[in-house]
Image (cartoon, rainbow, N blue to C red):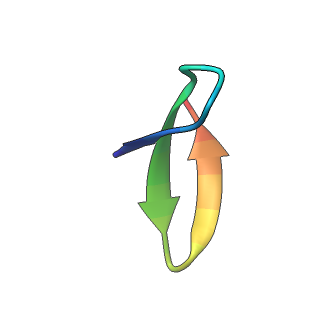
Amino acid sequence: MVADSSGNLYVTDGGNRIRK
């Protein structure tokens, strides 16, 4: 999981960022 500068959480899936 990653969070962008806005604090949105993402899961990385094969290099694609999918917003949860």
Write down the quadrant of residue 16 in the picture. Answer: bottom right
Quadrant for the C terminus in the image: top right
Residue at position x 46%, y 60% from top?
12
Residue at position x 61%, y 31% from top?
5
Q: Nearer the viewer, residue 4 or 17?
A: 4
User: Where's residue 6, x and y in %?
Assistant: 65, 21
Write down the quadrant of residue 2 in the picture. Answer: top left
Q: Is residue 12 left or right of residue 18?
A: left
Image height of 17 relative to 18, above or below? below
**What residue occupies the far top of the structure in this picture?**
7
Residue at position x 54%, y 20% from top?
7
Q: Is residue 18 left or right of residue 1?
A: right
User: Where's residue 18, x and y in %?
Assistant: 62, 47
Residue at position x 57%, y 23% from top?
8
Image height of 3 relative to 18, above or below? above
Q: Is residue 6 left or right of residue 3?
A: right
Q: How many marks?
A: 0
**What residue occupies the far left of the structure in this picture?**
1
Q: Nearer the viewer, residue 5 or 16?
A: 5
**What residue occupies the far bottom of the structure in this picture?**
14
User: Where's residue 13, x and y in %?
Assistant: 48, 67
